[in-house]
Amino acid sequence: MPVFDMIETVLVRKFRFRPGLTLRLIARTLYVGFTMFVAITFPFFSALLSFFGGFAFAPTTYFLPCIMWLTIYKPKRLSLSWFTNWICIVLGVLLMELSPIGGLRQIILKAKTYKFYQ
């Protein structure tokens, strides 16, 4: 949604489009179409998502919220919630480290036989 909002803001402020449902429908459809074109063009698009997702998705989803929760609520050491959060932190860090490695491996393997639109 922030991407759509940014696109619509640029279209309204810089290009003087009139805001409304029509602008939203056209801008979002073109953006999704462009994204689909990029995904079709590059057969290793899923590996790119894995590579970049390991840097952005894993920390913000798995272990940073657990670290913040432990810092704010300070549960008893060795309690169930303490263990659960630490397990999520360890798994999140492993995911953050392994996902980009796997994504990069897939990119390298697929790039050897890469041909546009085939």
Image (tube, grey):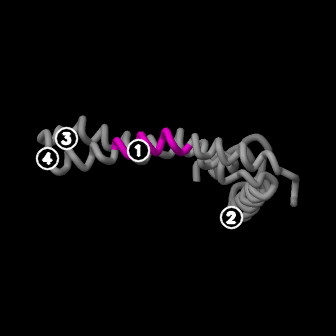
SS state under label 4: loop
Q: Looking at this view, is 84 or 1 the one in front?
A: 84
> Can residue 62 be seen by looking at this rendering?
yes
The verdict on residue 118 being magenta is: no
Q: Nearer the viewer, mark 2 or mark 3?
A: 3
Q: Quadrant of the C terminus?
A: bottom right
From the image, tell me which residue sits under label 3.
Answer: 73
Give the magenta range: 89-99
Q: Looking at this view, is 64 or 20 the one in front?
A: 64
Check disc 4: other Cα within 10 Å, few if <14, some if 14-19, many if 20+: few
From the image, tell me which residue sits under label 1.
Answer: 92
Looking at the image, tell me whether mark 1 or mark 3 is earlier in sequence order: 3
Distance of mark 1 from mark 2, alpha carbons?
Answer: 40 Å
Q: Nearer the viewer, mark 2 or mark 4?
A: 4
Left-right relation of 3 to 69: right
Q: Which mark is residue 45?
A: none
Distance of mark 2 from mark 4, alpha carbons?
Answer: 52 Å
Q: Do the numbered discs 3 and 4 sit on residues whose CB atoms are within 8 Å? A: no
SS state under label 3: helix
